[in-house]
Image (cartoon, rainbow, N blue to C red):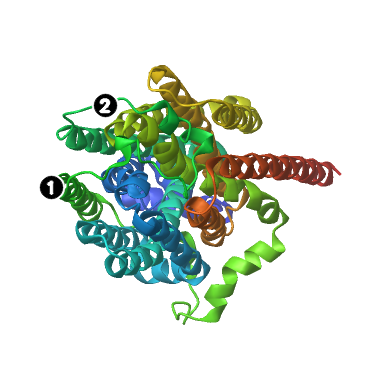
């Protein structure tokens, strides 16, 4: 009897001899069979990260800059801020049930692409800004916004997790870098959109008269919706020709963003969809309850509500109240874009920088930095009376606010991606839900209370949010220490 019959490697040797494969080649094949198979190459993942970032850049070059001007362009009866409030109100309802269903049906790519069309519709409505056009368009945009952002976050988190496994690094480090790159590119939209608005409106400025001291006393923290500004020509509405030109440029940029996503972005098949249960794609109350189930069962999510809420409050303040109460009131609408460019540049640069540095120092120092910077800005806004001769102060405060916002946007997104890897859709739906509640509240009271009251609200929510974040860090570290002790035992 051939002794090879009792050799455990006999079958393996037969395979090698039969196919003429030497030892090195067989080892290579065996390694390839056991190596995890990913649905994208590293190049594809990086390419898609860039595509998503630039698609959002073109879309939000238009939308964010147009949002910054709503309290100035459509100030009559508070139409502009009312429309923004409606957007985020509809977004809250959309967050509750639409994102998982739409992502399952359309996939992340087409969810992003088709949701972009709702933004374009809102921009078109600004050509004829009336309650009958702005409000319906705002509702449609709000419905499309939740799937857009949830799909984007899911796409970056999923591909970031794949890239981490490919490169042998941790999910948290890669997801932080991915969100850092995204927000670095995304936040430059503040530069281009605001530059466009300032150039368009500057064309009609022929007489830059000084604002009377009495009128300046009603700017800044003292600005209130019921004040009369008889001696302030800065608050006169721009010519309609300028408004039409601006809206046309913004619609063009948004359309380019849509085609970038529709043509260049690769489809993403989520890992959990490989074992999807039959009938999961039905729109039902079970999908609606996913968001609240996650909220009710996750202590981390509950503690992060105030900080996520503040994320909406602070973005609404810089976009609506800082631009109207400080810049437009004392400098004129043509300066809104220039000051907000400074905000956008710092926001973009810090988003990239902080996304890279967090792997070395962790989340905590950055959140402390954001707390101190934003708190300092809010106190300065309360005490400082805006004066045209102090132009540098406008830019310094805008830059500091952008630094704090860069931390809040990148680190909260990354924190959600890191803490809730098992339920990213439900987690990011909660993120958009509570951030939207912050937007709703800020835009809803924008045309009813004075600026100093808004600043007190910012200070209170920022402080409460940082307390909640600190509790999350403590609980998470205790949980990790406890799991390590169990493993050792």
Q: On the rendered image, what quadrant is the C terminus found in?
A: top right
In this picture, is 6 found above or below 329?
below
Mark seen at residue 120: none
Residue 259 shows in the view: yes
Q: Quadrant of residue 369?
A: top right
Depth order, front residue of 253/134: 134
Mark seen at residue 209: 2
- Expressed as whole percent of the image width and height from the top left, the position of residue 15 reads 40, 53
* Dot placed on the residue nearer the N-terminal end, 2 or 1: 2
Disc 2 crowd, CA 10 A, few/some/many (<14, 14-19, 20+): few
Depth order, front residue of 107/308: 308
**What residue do we see at 49% from left, 31% from top?**
401
Q: Secondary structure at mark 2?
A: loop
In this picture, is 335 found above or below 307?
above
**What residue do we see at 54% from left, 25% from top?**
384
- Expressed as whole percent of the image width and height from the top left, the position of residue 10 reads 50, 52
Depth order, front residue of 41/467: 467
Depth order, front residue of 413/212: 212
Q: Which residue is mark 1?
A: 241
Drawn side of residue 304 relative to residue 471, left or right: left
**What residue do we see at 58% from left, 46% from top?**
310
């Amino acid at each position: 009897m051939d002794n090879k019959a009792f050799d455990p490697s006999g079958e393996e040797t037969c395979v090698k001899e039969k196919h003429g494969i030497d030892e090195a080649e067989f080892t290579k094949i065996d390694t390839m069979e056991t190596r995890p198979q990913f649905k994208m190459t590293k190049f594809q993942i990086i390419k898609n990260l860039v595509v998503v970032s630039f698609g959002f850049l073109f879309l939000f070059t238009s939308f964010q800059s147009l949002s910054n001007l709503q309290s100035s362009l459509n100030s009559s009866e508070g139409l502009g801020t009312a429309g923004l409030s409606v957007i985020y109100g509809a977004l809250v309802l959309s967050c509750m049930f639409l994102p998982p269903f739409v992502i399952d049906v359309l996939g992340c790519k087409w969810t992003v692409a088709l949701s972009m069309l709702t933004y374009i519709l809102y921009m078109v409505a600004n050509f004829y800004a009336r309650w009958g056009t702005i409000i319906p368009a705002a509702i449609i945009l709000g419905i499309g916004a939740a799937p857009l952002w949830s799909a984007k976050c899911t796409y970056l988190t999923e591909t970031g997790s794949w890239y981490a496994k490919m490169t042998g690094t941790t999910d948290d480090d890669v997801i932080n870098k991915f969100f850092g790159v995204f927000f670095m590119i995304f936040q430059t939209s503040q530069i281009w959109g605001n530059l466009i608005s300032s150039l368009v409106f500057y064309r009609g400025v022929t007489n830059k008269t000084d604002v009377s001291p009495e009128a300046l006393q009603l700017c800044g923290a003292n600005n209130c919706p019921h004040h009369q500004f008889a001696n302030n020509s800065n608050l006169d509405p721009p010519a309609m020709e300028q408004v039409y030109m601006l809206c046309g440029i913004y619609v063009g940029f948004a359309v380019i963003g849509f085609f970038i996503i529709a043509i260049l972005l690769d489809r993403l098949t989520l890992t959990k969809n490989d074992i999807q249960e039959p009938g999961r794609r039905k729109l039902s109350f079970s999908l609606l309850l996913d968001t609240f189930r996650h909220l009710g069962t996750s202590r981390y999510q509950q503690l992060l509500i105030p900080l996520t809420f503040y994320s909406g409050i602070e973005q609404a303040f810089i976009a609506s109240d800082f631009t109207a109460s400080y810049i437009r009131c004392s400098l004129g609408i043509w300066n809104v874009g220039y000051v907000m460019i400074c905000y956008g540049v710092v926001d973009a640069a810090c988003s990239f920088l902080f996304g890279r540095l967090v792997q070395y120092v962790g989340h905590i120092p950055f959140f402390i930095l954001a707390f101190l910077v934003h708190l300092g800005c809010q106190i300065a806004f309360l005490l400082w009376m805006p004066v045209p001769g102090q132009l540098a102060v406008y830019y310094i405060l805008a830059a500091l606010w952008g630094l704090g916002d860069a931390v809040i946007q990148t680190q909260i997104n990354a924190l959600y991606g890191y803490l809730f890897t098992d339920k990213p859709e439900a987690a990011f739906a909660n993120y958009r839900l509570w951030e939207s509640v912050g937007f709703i509240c800020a835009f809803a009271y924008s045309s009813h209370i004075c600026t100093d009251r808004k600043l007190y609200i910012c200070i209170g929510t920022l402080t409460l949010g940082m307390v909640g974040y600190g509790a999350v860090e403590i609980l998470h570290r205790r949980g990790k220490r406890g799991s390590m002790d169990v493993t050792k035992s």
